[in-house]
């Protein structure tokens, strides 16, 4: 009986440590709002957005086809790329836990 209690205690301790060490549990998502503009107004046309983590520029974390979007993303460094009529604009941004960030790109 003592060994069983010890084993159960060890498993519960391990599970607790595993959850505490998981960064997804410790950090909450941040919110980024993407806005494409034409002549200082919302573009109101389909802009192709791709959002990349800076540490992996080959695989977008999000791809969206509209002039504005609001995304929940993990904290970290990102780059937003917008394409409209063969014009490409981009901006790097840092997203912190529980924060709001706005990325506005002029497509003129």
Image (spheres, grey):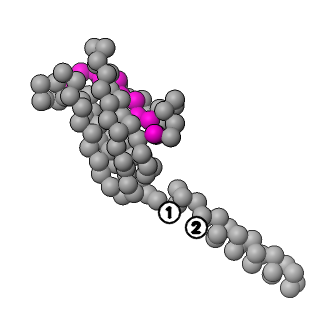
Rendered location of residue 32, percent (x, y): 32, 44
> In the figure, residue 108 lies in which quadrant?
top left
> In the figure, residue 79 lies in which quadrant?
top left
Residue nearest the viewer, comparing 73 with 94: 94
Q: Are marks 1 and 2 in contact (CB under 8 Å)?
A: yes
Query: SS for tag 1?
Result: helix
Residue nearest the viewer, comparing 51 with 93: 93
For the record, the magenta segment spans 43-54
Q: Residue at x 32, y 41 (%)?
A: 70
Q: Which mark is residue 20?
A: 2
Rendered location of residue 99, percent (x, y): 33, 55
Rendered location of residue 50, percent (x, y): 40, 30
Residue 69 appears anywhere in the view? no
Compared to residue 3, the image places residue 35 above or below, namely above
Q: Residue at x 29, y 18 (%)?
A: 87
Query: SS for tag 2?
Result: helix
Return the residue at label 1: 26
> In the figure, residue 46 lies in which quadrant?
top left
Q: Residues within 10 Å of mark 1 (few under 14, many from 20)?
A: few
């Amino acid at each position: 009986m003592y060994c069983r209690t010890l084993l159960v205690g060890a498993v519960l301790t391990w599970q607790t440590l595993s959850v505490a060490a998981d960064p997804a549990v410790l950090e909450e998502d941040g919110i980024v709002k993407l806005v494409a503009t034409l002549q200082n107004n919302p573009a109101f046309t389909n802009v192709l957005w791709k959002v990349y983590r800076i540490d992996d520029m080959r695989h977008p974390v999000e791809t969206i086809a509209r002039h504005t979007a609001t995304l929940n993303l993990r904290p970290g460094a990102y780059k937003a790329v917008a394409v409209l009529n063969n014009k490409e604009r981009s901006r790097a941004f840092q997203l912190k836990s529980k924060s709001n960030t706005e990325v506005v790109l002029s497509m003129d």
